[in-house]
């Protein structure tokens, strides 16, 4: 209960802060919330259950393309698009998990399969003209709550709401029986099976939930930027971002991934603003440096480092 | 005598050309402690893996409470009430002692009232309640072994397969765990124990099965 209270207080404070942020600051806030949600979703499978995915872009992309295509082709309301995106993301995650995990493929194999499937999806979408092929799809601007298109400040609140939904979902998972099932699978599969846990079923459920939550970020991005293309929605960089934020923030912790996004996204934007004219892609080098430093100094992630420091201070 | 709780009938298992368990048969009755002894490489752990479903027997039949359980996967057997510990201790290292047992309690997916209360009660039975909030990885070896026992108990096991729970323990620690085990039997739990500590086996077990080179060579 305390955690949920803290979360709500944090959300209210953040809601207050965004009103005084400059427009560029609001943009970064939205990105942090968006990537934070994605990293939290990734963590359900990668951190809690210990099955590292290198292809979470496929869920984001699926969500974005499903909602956008439904809106553009059939005029389906974006809010319903969100629901469809989640369902598709969950089904995709579940079936992917079923195919891979049933064959006892874990670890490196799962990571490679996810990478391959996401890449296949990217190439496929790049060649489907109905989905805009490599040119992508543009959403005509039409402000209003019904169209899920807001002002900058409005999007800040929407992003906050998205983050809150994903956070509450993650807390609910962690505290349910599934939370114990997922963690036991991560810790020791044989021992988990020995206490009656269906390891394969557990992994499939984790993949489905992780996919469903990750898919929520797709339509949001699409409606915020009003443009999606295979490169940005299904590309490897997006998958790596999800994994990296979770890794830097701390795989073992519930909200480490959000912290990772909150540190790395502004850093990226800052570096891009400072050096993009001369050193394009410098943020990737920075990612590398941050990753090495975190692995050396705090292998349990920034969240673990923070918890350690607070505990030491308390003593 | 009533029907046996666990029946092992002509069970064999081999790894490639190596016949690790060969035509093994024995019965285990309710409220019984059965010792399983034999030299290293006799096939005791392989037999455990077969009974608990981690390995599928190449030949033979295993029944539990009268039902055929041959070849069922481990999580189903655990739900039926067969718990086990591992020779190489494997608690869930990065969660707390209490959470380890809670995982055992919720693992079989059955209705139990207050999960934490049940788990704490189990910890008391193995005298680990004072460690509840500690990370499992920080426990010393004897307590890790007791934690594994607690986790299996939490999952509602009526038959426990214990793979060398006393190995590496001091005589005092062995006495402690022996008290716990005989209390478990009083609570109606049957035990199949693999052990090299003869003192413990001899004083605890009702009967002993001796294995060598995959075969049962003596029983009684």
Image: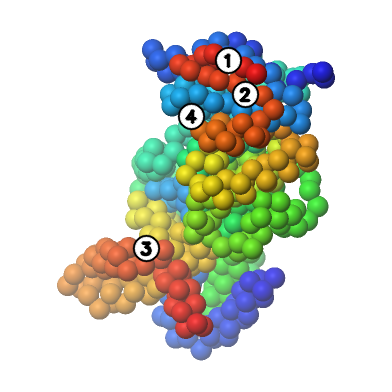
Circle 1 residue: B218
Circle 2 residue: B208
Q: Secondary structure at mark 4?
A: loop
Q: Of the numbered discs in the image, which one, if any, rests on residue A103? A: 4
Residue A69, horizontal then vertical, whole percent: 53, 49
Marks 4, 3 in one chain = yes
Q: Quadrant of residue A294?
A: bottom left
Q: Of the numbered discs in the image, which one, if any, rests on residue A145? A: none
Compared with A138, A207 (above or below) is above
Q: Considering depth in this image, is B194 or A8 the residue closer to the camera?
A: B194
Identify which residue is drawn at 71% across, 32% down: B190
Q: Considering depth in this image, is A207 or B50 the residue closer to the camera?
A: B50
Q: Of the numbered discs in the image, which one, if any, rests on residue A299? A: 3
Give the number of the mark in front: 4 or 1: 1
Marks 2, 4 in one chain = no
Subunit ID for the residue under disc 3:
A
Q: Are marks 2 and 3 in contact (CB under 8 Å)?
A: no
Left or right, A92 with respect to A288, comes to right
Neighbour class for label 1 at 10 Å: few (<14), some, many (≥20)? Answer: few
Subunit ID for the residue under disc 1:
B
Marks 4, 1 in one chain = no
Q: Secondary structure at mark 2?
A: strand
Residue A147, horizontal then vertical, whole percent: 60, 64
Left or right, B199 with respect to A55, comes to right
Q: Secondary structure at mark 3?
A: loop
Identify which residue is drawn at 70% across, 55% down: B124
Upstream in sequence: badge 4 or badge 3: 4
Upstream in sequence: badge 1 or badge 2: 2
Could you give the CA–CA distance between mark 2 and mark 4, rounded to whole angstroms? 39 Å
């Amino acid at each position: 209960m305390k955690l949920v209270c803290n979360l709500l207080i944090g959300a209210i404070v953040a809601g207050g802060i965004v009103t005084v942020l400059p427009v560029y600051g609001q943009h970064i806030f939205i990105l942090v919330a968006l990537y934070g949600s994605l990293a939290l979703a990734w963590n359900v499978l990668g951190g809690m259950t210990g099955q590292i995915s290198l292809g979470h872009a496929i869920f984001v992309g699926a969500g974005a393309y499903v909602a956008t295509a439904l809106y553009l082709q059939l005029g389906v309301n974006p809010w319903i698009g969100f629901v469809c995106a989640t369902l598709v993301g969950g089904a995709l995650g579940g079936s992917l998990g079923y195919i891979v995990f049933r064959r006892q493929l874990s670890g490196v194999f799962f990571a490679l399969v996810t990478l391959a499937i996401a890449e296949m999806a990217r190439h496929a979408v790049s060649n489907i003209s109905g989905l805009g092929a490599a040119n992508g799809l543009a959403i005509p601007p039409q402000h209003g709550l019904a169209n899920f298109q807001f002002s900058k400040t409005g999007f800040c609140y929407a992003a906050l709401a998205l983050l809150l939904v994903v956070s509450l979902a993650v807390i609910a998972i962690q505290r349910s029986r599934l939370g114990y099932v997922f963690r036991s699978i991560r810790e020791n599969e044989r021992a988990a099976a020995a206490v009656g846990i269906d390891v394969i079923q557990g992994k499939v459920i984790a993949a489905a939930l992780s996919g469903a939550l990750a898919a929520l970020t797709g339509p949001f991005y699409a409606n915020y930027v009003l443009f999606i293309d295979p490169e940005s929605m299904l590309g490897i960089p997006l998958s790596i971002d999800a994994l990296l934020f979770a890794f830097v923030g701390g795989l073992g912790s519930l909200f480490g991934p959000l912290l990772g996004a909150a540190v790395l996204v502004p850093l990226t934007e800052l570096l891009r603003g400072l050096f993009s004219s001369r050193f394009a892609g410098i943020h990737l080098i920075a990612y590398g440096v941050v990753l090495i430093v975190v692995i050396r100094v705090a292998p349990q992630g920034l969240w673990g480092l923070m918890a350690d420091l607070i505990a030491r201070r308390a003593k | 005598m009533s029907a046996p709780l666990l029946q092992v009938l002509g069970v064999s298992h081999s790894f490639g050309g190596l016949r690790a368990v060969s035509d093994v048969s024995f019965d285990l009755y309710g409220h019984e402690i059965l010792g399983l002894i034999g030299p290293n490489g006799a096939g005791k752990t392989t037999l455990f893996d077969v009974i608990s479903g981690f390995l599928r027997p190449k030949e033979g039949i295993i029944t539990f409470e009268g039902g055929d359980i041959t070849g069922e996967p481990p999580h189903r057997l655990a739900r039926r009430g067969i718990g086990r510990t591992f020779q190489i201790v494997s608690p869930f290292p990065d969660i707390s002692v209490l959470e380890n047992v809670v995982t055992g309690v919720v693992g079989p997916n059955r209705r139990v009232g207050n999960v934490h209360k049940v788990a704490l009660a189990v910890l008391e039975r193995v005298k680990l309640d004072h460690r509840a909030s500690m990370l499992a990885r920080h426990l010393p070896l004897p307590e890790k072994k007791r934690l594994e026992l607690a986790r299996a108990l939490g999952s509602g096991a009526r038959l426990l397969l214990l793979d060398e729970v006393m190995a590496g323990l001091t005589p005092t620690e062995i006495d402690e765990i022996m008290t716990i085990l005989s209390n478990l039997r009083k609570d109606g739990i049957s035990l199949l124990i693999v052990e090299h500590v003869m003192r413990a086996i001899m004083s605890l077990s009702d009967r002993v099965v001796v294995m060598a080179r995959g075969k049962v060579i003596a029983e009684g």
